[in-house]
Image (cartoon, rainbow, N blue to C red):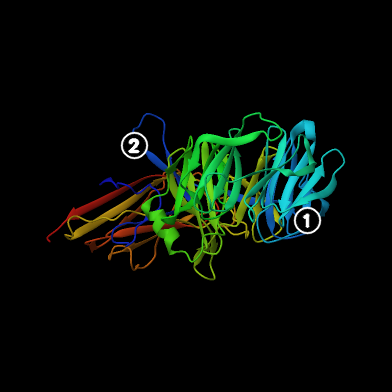
Amino acid sequence: MGVFPGFLGPSYESQTPVAGAERCVNWYPEALESGMKGRVALYPTPGVQSFATLGDTPIRGLFAQQGRCFAVAGGTLYEINEAGTPTNLGAVLEDGNPATFTTNGDQGGQLAISSGDLVYVLRLSDNTLTQPVSDASHVAFLDGYVLKLDPATSKVNISALNDANAWDATEFLQRTAGSDRLRSLLVADRDIWLFGERTSEVWWNQGTSPFPFAPAEEGFIEEGTAAPFSPALLNKTPVWLGQNQDGDRIVWRASGYQPVRISTHAIEHALASYERVDDAVGFTYQQRGHNFYVLNLPDAGATWAYDAATQLWHERGTWRSDRVRFDAWHPQSHCYVFNKHLVGDRMSGTVFELDVDLYNDTNGKPIHRIRQAPHINNEHRQVFHRSLELEFGRGLGAIAGQGVDPQFMLQWSNDGGQTWGNEHWRGAGPQGQYGRRAIWRRLGVGRDRVYRLAVSDPIFWPLVGAYLDVETGAS
């Protein structure tokens, strides 16, 4: 019996499953840093529990700063306190798009929100809500100014210094290098990133008067965005779903002012298969040393997550047992506050706490996890499969209820991942039973086999190894 190479790995489904059929759903790979070169574990993605239920739906955005948490749900702005109690701060226009937030700091004392193509300003001292200006899909902040993007005119207007309620219509920037319309706005490392339909450009504060911002030298980028709400900051650098004059649906990450491709051919094949991607929403969060960029594609029913620590992709999803498939993951916005990761449900008015020690999804059901392994073949000769053993976190069964005796389910395909055989179950052991092994024996013969492992008990499910005993036969 030897190590099963690649069993603990990312998602990589190629254009044909015969070439690559790997899936990693609701697990993520972690490279172990103990000196054992090449050692990888699969750890379960976090679960959720309800933190706050808002009076409107769905959650369209979350924001936190200086110990205060704000949310836009449907057509209402809320503040949520540490106990999870929401306060209605006023009505905002709803257009079905995400809401964006920014503040102008202690000097301005204001929170600016874009919602329904309007800008709303909340005075933080007394929660007075005003609507001073229109035509805005995104807001951001830099050097005392609130910025708003009007995608209909490709203009970015700036507020008065430290006052988001005061706007001069003559104070704006407009595209200088590209002719395509602007679609998205992001401030990264004191630069203003303006994403267009086919190209993008970067501006900075050069301190001129009366208008302080100007294009950055070498800040023209031959890559726009295919989804205006996909750009997000990952480790302080922009990441986005791109498109240019030659095509679309590649995920890029900035390196300076240069876009670097981080999607794989397998990810790009998946993106190309979706009817639409312009509804994609990106958000980021950091947990236990992993910085994740999560790209939700609601219409496609898919969620892809990129881990900056490993530069690998995995999938996330909310399992639909009635349809026997995953939907796009329901969390679609994030903020960190009260020492908690909070996420907003794109399908309801619930804000959830996201934590690795939680094992249920937003629907209240245990998270369904799948690992589909690489092909096992040897020049298309017969391969006799004697046994397969998993190395996992043993003795982690639940104290009571589902998961007291957690179970692995194993299937395999002998045609390269196109059709699947029967389910074969093995127990992972009750709590404290640390000697339990999960072994499947007499697994038959196949010329091109793919194994698929699934679990759904609400426990901690780390996978740290897999071992396969095979013998190659005649051709």
Q: Residue furthest bottom?
A: 322
Which comes sooner in the sequence, label 2 or label 1? 2
Residue topped by disc 2 = 38
Q: Quadrant of the C terminus?
A: bottom left
Q: Is residue 141 left or right of 233 when viewed as pictured?
A: right
Choose between 419 and 231: the one closer to the eye: 231
Q: Is the residue 212 above or below the residue 194 in the image?
A: above
Choose between 109 and 455: the one closer to the eye: 109
Q: Quadrant of residue 296?
A: bottom right
Residue type, numbered disc 2: Gly
Rendered location of residue 208, percent (x, y): 66, 30
Rendered location of residue 111, percent (x, y): 76, 42
Label 2 packing within 10 angstroms: few (<14), some (14-19), many (20+): few
Residue type, numbered disc 1: Val
Q: Is residue 27 visible?
A: yes
Q: Is residue 447 left or right of 169 when viewed as pictured?
A: left
Choose between 217 and 63: the one closer to the eye: 217
The secondary element bearing badge 1 is classed as loop
Q: Is the residue 95 above or below the residue 79 in the image?
A: below
Q: Nearer the viewer, mark 2 or mark 1?
A: 1
Q: Is residue 82 visible?
A: no
Residue topped by disc 1 = 92
- Mark 2 to mark 1 CA distance (whole Å): 51 Å
Q: Is residue 446 left or right of 311 when viewed as pictured?
A: left
Label 1 packing within 10 angstroms: few (<14), some (14-19), many (20+): many
The secondary element bearing badge 2 is classed as loop
Q: Residue at x 65, y 61 (%)?
A: 347
Q: Residue furthest left?
A: 474
Rendered location of residue 351, percent (x, y): 69, 52
Rendered location of residue 90, percent (x, y): 83, 53
